[in-house]
Amino acid sequence: MEADTAPGVVVTDKAIRRVAKILTNEPAGTALRIGVSGGGCSGFQYTFDLVQDREADDIVIARDGATVLIDPMSLEYLSGSEIDFVDDLIGQSFQIRNPNATSSCGCGTSFSLF
């Protein structure tokens, strides 16, 4: 499925601009894969990987020179989330505001659903 949004997931303009900037230094066809895997200090963790491979069932968010991929399993955990890019005094990072998370770690890369 290719679109500029994923069902139930919002990628902010700031995040799209940052992904596009990152991809300018990568080979053609590279995308940012955002996923959820088991682990981290809170039970689940967000993953961010630059990839060349796409799966047939990937959700593809493509706009303004940026391509973001989300696999269907991760989409279940990310439903309702906003993916943003933050540049503040602490540093630069992609941040996910996930309404499904009941708790998260201090660094913001892992979360719990229970």
Image: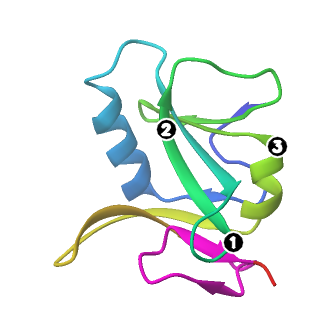
Spatial CA span between label 1 and label 2 = 19 Å
Q: Amino acid at mark 3?
A: Pro
Q: Amino acid at mark 2?
A: Asp
**Disc 2 packing (10 Å; few <14; some 14–19; many ≥20):** few
Quarter of the image for the C terminus: give it.
bottom right
- Label ID, residue 43: 1
Judging by the rendered image, the residue that carries numbered circle 2 is 49
Q: Which element is circle 2 on? A: strand
Question: Residue 99 versus residue 39: which sits nearer the camera?
Answer: 39
The answer to whether residue 43 is magenta is: no
Above or below, 105 relative to 6: below
The residue at 43%/35% (across/down) is 64
- The percent coordinates of residue 43 (x first, y second) are 69, 71
Most prominent secondary structure in the magenta stretch?
Answer: loop
Judging by the rendered image, the residue that carries numbered circle 3 is 72
Which range is magenta?
98-112
